[in-house]
Image (cartoon, helix red, strand yellow):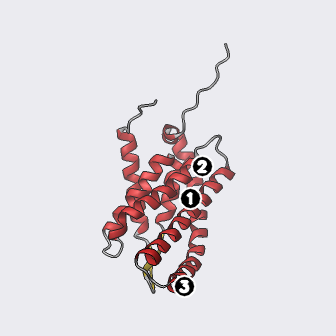
Amino acid sequence: MKNKKFTVKDITTIALMAALVFVATNIKIDIPTPLGKTMVHMGNIICVLSGMLFGPVHGGLAAGIGSAIFDLTDPVFAPEFWITFIMKFCMGYIAGKIAHSGKKSGAKIIIAALCGIFSYRIIYVAKEVILHYFILKSPWETVLAVLVSTNLISILSMIWNVIASILLYSMLAPHLKRAGIIDHYAPIKKEKQNT
C-alpha cells in the first residue's frame, strides 16, 4: 500500500465533501470589524466532520478545497484563498488524524472535534497577528482589540461547531459504516494470525 493512489471513489468523496463545505460556509452571518469583515458560518462543522468521517488526508483536502473555493467567490476573501486552504486543511487533517488513530470511541470523536476546531482558531489568530501587525503595520492596540472582539464571537461559534460536528458524526457514521464507506478510509492494520 506504499504507492496508494487516489481512486475515483476518493476523488468523488473529496469533491462531495468540498461541495458541502462550500454550501455550509455560505450559511453565514457577516460581522464587520475595524480591520475588515469576519463571519460566523457553518462551514467549520463540515470541515471537522470531513476529517472525522474520511480521515486526515481526504477530510483535510475536502475542508481546504471547499473553503478556498468559497474565498475565491468573495472579493474580500479571495486574495487569502491559499491561506484559507492551508488553515482549513489543517483543521480537517487534525480532526481526522485523531479520529482515525487506534480504536474508535466516543471520547476520541469528542477530542477530535475539539482539537480540529481549536487548532483552526490558533492558526487563525496567528495569521491575523502576522498579517495585520507585521505585514500591514497596524498598531498593536488595534490588532489586539480586533482579536479580542472576534474571539469573543468565536467562542460561541466554536462551541456550536464542536457540538454540531459530533452530533452529525454520530448520526452519519453508523450508516456509512454499514454501507462500507468509512472502512475504505480507515487505516489498514495487519492482524496477527494464529498459526
Residue sitting at x 48%, y 59%: 46
User: Callout 1: helix, strand or loop?
Assistant: helix
Rounded to the nearest whole Å, what is the CA distance between mark 3 and mark 2? 33 Å
- Residue 184 lies, with reference to residue 36, above or below; the image says above
Rounded to the nearest whole Å, what is the CA distance between mark 1 and mark 3? 25 Å
The kind of residue tagged 2 is Ile
Residue 149 falls in which quadrant of the image? bottom right
The kind of residue tagged 1 is Gly
Residue 159 falls in which quadrant of the image? bottom right
Is 166 left or right of 25, judged from the image as shown? right
Residue 98, which numbered label? 2
Q: Which residue is mark 3?
A: 145
Q: Which residue is mark 1?
A: 116
* Label whose residue precedes the other's in the sequence (1 or 3): 1
User: Callout 2: helix, strand or loop?
Assistant: helix
The quadrant the C terminus occupies is top right
Tell me where residue 143 appears, x and y as whole percent: 50, 81
Badge 1 density bin: few <14, some 14–19, many ≥20, Cα 10 Å: many
- Residue 172 lies, with reference to residue 28, above or below; the image says above
